[in-house]
Image (spheres, rainbow, N blue to C red):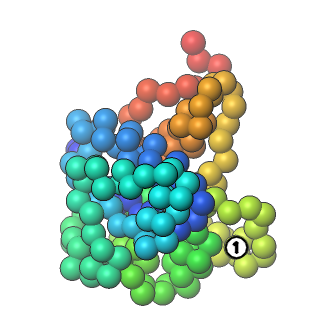
Amino acid sequence: MEKMKIIVAITGASGSIYAKVLLNKLSQLKENVATVGVVMSDNAKTVWQHELGDSDYKNYSFSFYSKSDFMAPFASGSAKYSTMIVCPCSMGTLGRIAGGISDDLITRAADVILKERRKLILVVRDTPYNLIHINNMKIITESGGIICPATPSFYSNPKSFEELAATVVDRILDLSGLPIDTYRWKEI
């Protein structure tokens, strides 16, 4: 299997625990991942600090890019990033992607991934959805993206917030095509 080049975008939606667990798991998949480029919105940093009580996102060895850095490699399809994960994905970001508005690196990268027919996974966290949200999700799906709501499962009897978040993150990694060892329903 060829090593994957992955973009992770973190927006200001509540659910920083999902982003943290995702970055932790990607750190452990070095044999399958060539590079991870990360872009965080300003609100994502604020929400991370509020929800998790730290700035540990600064401690990862991935390449981080400013939301205004249109010179980042994944701002172009020629860089051949295969997958983009927006986790968590705010409804504002979802709406801008659905509308084709590339006003920052997150939305530009998503536009590139869609136009190149590569894998875009939006981990929406807001609830409930209004009709605008649902219509935007429909547009993303019709355009080839995947809507993966941050809806945890309980089959594996998670014992902590991180284990609960991992039930969503493992699903994201499965959708990405990365081989992971995770709980599988009815498997021994």
Give whichever of 103, 53 is nearer the camera: 53
The type of residue carrying mark 1 is: His
Q: Residue at x 62, y 28 (%)?
A: 158
**Where's residue 92, x and y in %?**
59, 77
- In this rendering, does residue 115 appear at all? no
**Where's residue 117, x and y in %?**
40, 67
- In this rendering, does residue 8 appear at all? yes
Give whichever of 84, 72 is nearer the camera: 72
**Where's residue 16, x and y in %?**
52, 54
Would residue 18 be found to the left or right of residue 112 on screen?
right
Vertical comparison of 79 with 50: above or below: below
Q: Quadrant of the C terminus?
A: top right
Q: Provide the secondary structure element on which disc 1 rests.
A: helix
The count of marks equals 1
Give whichever of 95, 116 is nearer the camera: 95
Quarter location, residue 72: bottom left
Vertical comparison of 71 with 3: above or below: below
Would residue 113 be found to the left or right of residue 163 on screen?
left
**Residue at the front extreme of this rendering:** 53
**Residue at the top extreme of this rendering:** 188
Q: Residue at x 67, y 47 (%)?
A: 151
Vertical comparison of 145 with 32: above or below: below
Vertical comparison of 152 with 41: above or below: above
| Residue position marked by numbered label 1 in the rendering | 133
Q: Residue at x 28, y 50 (%)?
A: 59
Q: Quadrant of the N terminus?
A: top left
**Where's residue 120, x and y in %?**
46, 62
Assess disc 1: are there few (<14), some (14-19) or many (≥20) residues with their C-alpha within 10 Å of its C-alpha.
some
Would residue 122 be found to the left or right of residue 102 on screen?
right
Would residue 24 be found to the left or right of residue 183 on screen?
left
Q: Residue at x 43, y 72 (%)?
A: 41
